[in-house]
Image (cartoon, coloured by chain):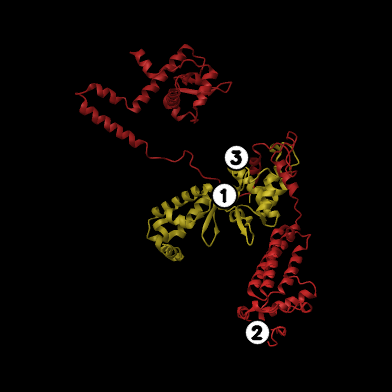
Chain colours: A yellow, B red
Amino acid sequence: MAAEEDWALTQSASQVQRNLERLLPAQVDQKVSELVQYLLVKDQKKIPIKRADILKNVIKDYKGVYSEIIKRAGRTLQQVFGLQVMEIDAKHHIYILVSNLPRLEGENLKQDDCTAKLGLLMVILSFLFMKGNAAKESAVWEMLRRLRVDPGVRHEVFGDVKKLVTEEFVRQKYLEYNRIPHTDPPEFEFQWGARAAKETSKMQILRFVAKVPACWEGWRGELKEGEGSDLGGA
Amino acid sequence: MAEDAGSGGGDSLQGRDSGRSRRRPPVPSTSRNGAVPEHQQRGLAGGQGRQRPPEPANEGGGGEEEESEEEPGQGTERAEPDGDHADRRMLRHQYRELINRVQQNREDMLSSNSNSLTDALQEANTLFSGVSQAREAALDAQFLVLASNLGKEKANELHSEMTVFDLPAFAEDLLTFMGLNRLEGEENDSDDESIASGFLPNDAWHKLGAEAERYFRRSPSFHYMLGSFKVDPPVPRQRIERQKRKAGTEEKRAMPAQLKKMEESHQEATEKEVERILGLLQTYFKEDPNMPISFFDFVIDPSSFARTVENIFHVSFIIRDGFARIKLDQDKLPVIEPSHEEEGRENDQNAQVRNQAVISLSHQDWKDIVETFEITEPMIPAPGVSQENES
């Protein structure tokens, strides 16, 4: 199966074109639509999407024109939704969706658990950045304890924080959680994950950190308008 | 990497090389039998840079030999290949102790203030001069790996210290941003003074997250607005209809009584109930047109939880079809009132905004409501009762 898959995928552009000609346009369009919907739904949990899954669940017999289908799906996502399909692992072919639209003021109307989790993630990413891109797990928890987040205590908002940070964020590729060699009992360190690298940047983190010292009360109303438009967007 | 400070260190480095290549001639073991033992000769001949296993040397009966010739003056010389078992055991013990100590005091080793890592390396160097066999050399190698990892970490920490990062201030600032209310905080009776006192609001992390979102290019999660579409429900209905039809035609003449019972299928019973309740509601309103009825007063049956739930279910049909409305009054309690006749059914389907609500009512809730609202009689009498009345 793997060998057959590889053969189909390594076809040259002209071969793909020829395969394309053998199919009805409607058939191909159907597959493109299916792929668009598949990607959108798979993206809900923010777990990166594997090419193998795409081939198995959507493309199926159309492997010979895979490159064309994914290209068109990417175009649709960009033009209709403003989303970009990015490959975060060129070796294992894993994709994520990233927004290409500039952020608007007042866009954050829906605040749910995802929002809160992103706040926590942001804190961790900033900390990692300040510590030179990697930090020991113990240092991260020490920092979070100051913010009343303790891995041993069930958190009101986050629940099992340790699981959230070491499993969910890692699966979503926001963070990397690696074992430090030669430590016994084993110790781990955190680093930025591939998704974090694509969805934000060191520059953006710096801007966030610069913004945090809140010298005002009632921050909601007074969020500096001028600064806001400057910081919006990638 | 290994910091060999001092002359002793330099020599022992040389000693290491010789240990591996065996280029240096061993000290003649005159104390034994005057002649250089045969196995030593073999060792000499063999080893240009090759790691000859010391086992052959050992087999020569190292244990039986007298104590090895470790002349203190020439501490940099390699020890006798057939060093005493006890000495070697001692050496291994010392190595293990050193390794353990380094692991236990990891933090101290990493601290930029302390030289303990350097000291440990020196110690290992000294120990190494006594090494001649693979077993001890392996321990030495283990220590080397540990020390070099620590060295790397220490170097990393040097780098990050250049960006002066004040963790407490960072944490304080974040808490402030999240809306920490320091004034109303309880006294901080925990031992850890690093945790600020104060009351953190429930939406603290949401606030932070909302700000953080602006710095991420996260794609919004895609969800179908009306949920997923399931194909199952229509099928059972068809089956029931077919059964009814069949039964009806076959048994029409023979048993009319049974036919009547057949008609009371689930679907029709529901419709009948809904109509009955609607009728009741409209009757109540004819009596008092301007006063909406409290929802709870209307649906609750103080004697039966099950019937209360059924009533709510039937009322929901009335609301769905637009014959009545549920609103919240000034006290935020739900009230029900019929819709006017002009707002007919068709209009409702097109023009009115459809809202959905989920009402949950536990057994305890029901009991509490009965008590609070002092409901003694159900406004919707049970179906059996009303039928008797009607007929």
Disc 1 element: helix
Residue under pointer 3 = A111
| x, y percent for residue B374 | 53, 16
Q: Amino acid at mark 3?
A: Gln
Name the residue type under label 2.
Gln
How would you rate the neighbour count of disc 2 (Cα within 10 Å): few for under 14, some for 14-19, many for 20 or more? many
Residue under the point 79% across and 78% down = B73
Q: Is residue A92 visible?
A: yes
Q: Which residue is mark 2?
A: B40
Q: Residue B41: x, y in percent?
A: 65, 86
Q: Which residue is mark 1?
A: A168
Q: Are marks 2 and 3 in contact (CB under 8 Å)?
A: no
Q: Position of residue A66 (x, y in %)?
A: 45, 59
Return the residue nearer the eye: B61 or A191.
B61
Of the residues shown, which amino acid type is indicated by label 1? Glu
Horizontal and vertical percent position of residue B48: 65, 84
Q: Is residue B339 visible?
A: no
